[in-house]
Image (cartoon, helix red, strand yellow):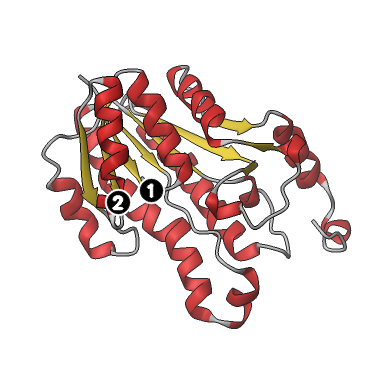
Amino acid sequence: MKHLLILGAKSDMAKALAKEYAKNGYHLILAGRKIQELSDFSNALKSDHAITVQLIHFDALELNTHASFVNELTIKPYGVICCVGYLGSQESAVNNSVESVRIINTNYVGCVSILNYCAQYLEQVQKGFIIGISSVAGERGRKSNYFYGSAKAGFTAYLSGLRARLYSESVHVMTVTPGFVYTNMTKHLDLPKVLSIHPEPLAKKIFKAQQKKKNVVYFKWIWKYIMWIIRMLPEFIFKRTNL
């Protein structure tokens, strides 16, 4: 019997992943703020897939609670998926340090803090997996979202190091770098259809990639080549673009 802990469980991406893993027999621990709002969702998962679902309060910004959160889990997970994320406002972050710190702490500091404690447990039992949902925004700093992008860049680098550390302990770490995803977080954006994906098909792809123990995965596949081109642009050209 395998249990999966999903952090940031109220997001559209997290709920799609919860459905996909439940369909494949995983019992779920859903963690997030105001988590009881997922009661109906939780009941539907239990009814549809004959699994157990726990709802637990978790706030990525409450760093002092992270150790006790992991230690007090009544059932320890085999896998952990971190879906915590906050796009925020680039314009506000430029002029308001409260917003810039919130973007950085939510997308990097909070994620690193909780995953460190999860990694310690999985390292002890020498099995399981960790999936971090990062972003192509972390591939290179763009003037339109460099606060969010820099946090995701740090998270991607952290996952890479964690993957190397846990490899010999039989714990797999996978970095997911999706492009544009149709969610509540991006509903105000005019996303290009050819480069965008809905949470449900993305969740299926993530599950398959995790089963194959992929290291870094891009969705859609075209993003891998787009980001290679963007990374190769010389800085004197890149700084003049509107990317």
Spatial CA distance of label 2 from label 1 is 8 Å
Residue 189 visible somewhere in the drawing: yes
Residue drawn at (88%, 57%), measured in percent from left and top? 237
x and y percentages locating residue 128 in the rendered image? 30, 26
- Say if residue 127 shows up in the picture: no
The residue nearer to you, when weighing 182 against 227, is: 182
Question: Considering only order in the chain, which callout, 1 or 2, is on the residue closer to the N terminus?
Answer: 1
Q: Secondary structure at mark 1?
A: loop
In the rendered view of the protein, which quadrant contains the C terminus? Answer: bottom right
Residue drawn 39% across and 29% down?
Answer: 19
Number of callouts in the render? 2
Q: Which residue is mark 2?
A: 37
Quadrant in which residue 81 is drawn: top left
* Relative height, residue 45 to residue 231 (above, below): above
The amino acid sitting under disc 1 is Lys
Marks 2 and 1 in Cβ contact (< 8 Å): yes
Across and down, in percent, residue 228 comes to 75, 38
Q: Which quarter of the figure is the N terminus placed in?
A: top left
Q: Is residue 154 above or below residue 89?
A: above
Percent from the top left, x then y, of residue 233? 83, 49
Residue lying at the far bottom of the rendered structure: 95
The kind of residue tagged 2 is: Glu
Q: Which mark is residue 10?
A: 1
